[in-house]
Image: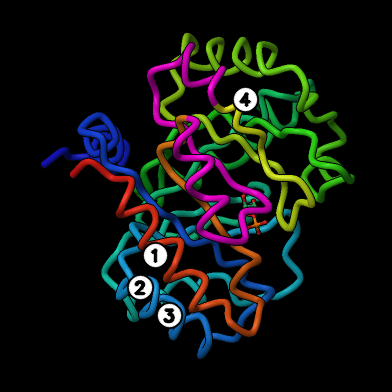
């Protein structure tokens, strides 16, 4: 068993396993509903729960993470919008560098603010290349980070960014269309990134059904993230369908 979360993820992905991560924004759920979703996520075979948002309005972050940790045994991984979204109760955090943009705050500034706190909490930071992909409308990440997304019609440009991030030592690459995106990350772009990089590829934003999840996996994604779908009336049932599809595409 690999000692680190990144080690475990990389090992599983290298063996051909496909993973499914469920994203919860603390603003969108009560503690009661979050606990219920955490239990259901684990039951249907999700591999981890991500927690975060571009901007948090609620003030129950630590409580939220503790509630999830009590409700399930799958890892709870932070997906922070900025350096304030940290909690010692989580298992690890995606240490995100927004490499598609050219804003120094998202490339090093927030990281410097977070580093001493991460050290004190003992959280495992997972160096992750975060790449925002054009998706039909201005996303919260685009607005908040004041950066431009990569054009969806330029797969080779995205591949060059991902490769540069791998050369810089990042352990994961996250292709992000943005929460609730009209258009999810195009398969051609995922395939181009897959051709050039060896590190695990996460794809999220606008994935609302199992067919779309399969399209991303077929193109070369290793990890599927869904968030918004849980807000739908039949959200739990869609989550179960997506989890089943990810399992079907998984080699082990
Ligand atoms: C957003 O990639 C995630 O950061 C998930 O997006 O909410 O559209 O599923 P959705």
Place residue 30 in its image quadrant.
Answer: bottom right
According to the image, label 3 marks what residue?
Answer: 67
Q: Is label 1 in contact with label 3 (beta carbons under 8 Å)?
A: no
At a point 61% along the width and 10% down the height, the residue shown is 160
Q: How crowded is mark 2: few (under 14 residues within 10 Å), some or many (20 or more)?
A: some
- Circles 1 and 2: CB atoms closer than 8 Å: yes
Query: What residue is at 71 percent from the left and 24 percent from the top?
Result: 100
Residue 252 forms part of the magenta stretch: no
Query: Which residues fall within the magenta stretch?
Result: 191-219
Neighbor class of circle 4 (other Cα within 10 Å; few <14, some 14-19, many 20+) is some
Q: Do the residues labelled 3 and 2 touch (CB within 8 Å)?
A: yes
Q: Distance between the residues labelled 1 and 4?
A: 38 Å
Q: Mark 4 points at which residue?
A: 188
11 with respect to 53 (left or right):
left
Relative vertical location of residue 203 with respect to residue 102 in this rendering, above or below: below
Secondary structure, mark 2, is helix
Disc on the earlier residue, 1 or 3: 3
Q: How far apart are marks 1 and 3 (CA)?
A: 10 Å
Tell which tag, 1 or 4, sits nearer the viewer: 4
Report the Cα–Cα distance between label 4 and label 3. 39 Å
Label 4 residue SS: helix
**What is the quadrant of residue 203 in the picture?**
top right
């Amino acid at each position: 068993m690999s000692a680190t979360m990144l080690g475990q993820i990389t090992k599983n992905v290298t063996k051909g396993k496909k993973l499914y991560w469920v994203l919860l924004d603390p603003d969108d759920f009560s503690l009661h509903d979050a606990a219920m979703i955490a239990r259901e996520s684990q039951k249907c075979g999700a591999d981890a729960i991500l927690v975060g948002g571009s901007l948090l309005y609620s003030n129950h972050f630590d409580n939220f993470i503790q509630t999830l940790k009590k409700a399930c045994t799958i890892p709870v991984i932070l997906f922070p919008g900025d350096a304030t979204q940290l909690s010692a109760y989580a298992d690890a955090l995606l240490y995100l560098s927004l490499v598609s943009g050219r804003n120094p705050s998202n490339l090093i500034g927030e990281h410097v603010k977070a580093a001493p706190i991460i050290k004190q909490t003992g959280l495992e930071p997972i160096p992750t290349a975060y790449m925002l992909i054009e998706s039909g409308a201005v996303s919260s990440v685009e607005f908040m980070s004041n950066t431009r997304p990569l054009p969806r019609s330029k797969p080779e440009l995205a591949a060059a960014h991902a490769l540069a991030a791998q050369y810089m030592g990042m352990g994961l690459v996250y292709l992000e269309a943005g929460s609730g995106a009209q258009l999810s990350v195009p398969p051609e772009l995922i395939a181009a990134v897959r051709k050039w990089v060896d590190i695990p590829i996460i794809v999220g934003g606008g994935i609302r059904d199992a067919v779309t999840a399969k399209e991303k996996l077929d193109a070369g994604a290793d990890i599927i993230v869904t968030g918004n779908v849980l807000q739908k009336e039949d959200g739990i049932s869609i989550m179960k369908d997506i989890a089943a599809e990810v399992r079907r595409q998984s080699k082990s």
